Image (spheres, grey):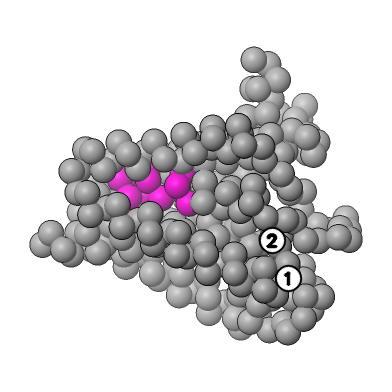
Amino acid sequence: MKKEWQIFLTAVMYYTRIPVGSNIDHAAEKLNQATRYLPFIGWITGAAMALLLWAFSFIAPLTICILLSLVLGIWMTGAFHEDGFADMCDGFGGGWTKEKILDIMKDSRVGTYGMLGLMLLMLTKFFSLEVLPLEKIMLAIAVAHPLSRFTAATIIYTHTYVRENEDSKAKPLAKGITASSLGIAAIWGLAPFIVVTLYLQHYLLLIIFPALLLARWYMVRLMQRWIGGYTGDCLGAMQQVAETIIYLCFCIVEWKYI
């Protein structure tokens, strides 16, 4: 139990800014095992965002509440996944060889592709949530954060990490996940979706699955074609794309029911 708790704290330390104490390190074994808790990190960030959204709804317009909620999510993770999305936009937008793409993604500077991609992504998130009533915004966030992280975790299981030469500037990264750990991650990732779907009885929300499968297929195809596998930035980009798609699906279902 103590070992499992340390693995969980490793996930919290790596994927969020929440302090966990100085006795937790970046050991590769623990980091790989911690991947099974990646969707549960979505429970933590999603719950915090939903709580802030609800609290500020008493004193501020809904649009401001949504914006503050998105800001909190970014702050809690240190823009970890957003940074990956921007880097992937820059790398795949500006590079024409595997080496060039990897070099661009490793660069800490943000280019035109990354800036525009991230801006459009955040606007899509905001406007997709903005059309929903307060309760459904909270539920959409509760579903999107765990499920999007599970979607990213599946890539770790099915594909290969491609950076061969890691320098001191490279982020530590979970490079493997077992079938049993993926099963645990699936429980954390899918449970909120099942509960919310049954609660709302909006079974059109099942469109989330084909939408995510299509997005995952496209992203993986892009990774395989150009670099032969995934990097940490690619996983962050997959999480961000999946989260945005889930918000879009909630938006579409809400529009359908109006």
Q: Circle 2 sits in a helix, a strand or a loop, which is it?
A: loop
Residue occupied by mark 2: 230
Res 239 label = none
Q: Does 43 appear above or below 73?
A: above
Q: Does 129 appear above or below 104?
A: above
CB under 8 Å between callouts 2 and 1?
A: yes
Q: Answer with the quarter of the image where residue 111 lies.
A: bottom right
Disc 1 residue type (three-letter): Ile
Horizontal placement of 65 versus 93: left or right?
Answer: left
Q: Residue at x 66, y 37 (%)?
A: 178
| Neighbour tally class for label 1: few under 14, some 14-19, many 20 plus, Cα within 10 Å | some
> Residue 97, image x and y in percent?
77, 81
Question: What stretch of residues is rendered in magenta?
Answer: 138-148
Quarter of the picture containing the N terminus is: top right
Residue occupied by mark 1: 227
Disc 2 residue type (three-letter): Tyr
Compare residues 234 and 2 and report the one nearer the observer.
Answer: 234
Q: Residue at x 68, y 84 (%)?
A: 94
Q: Residue at x 67, y 41 (%)?
A: 177
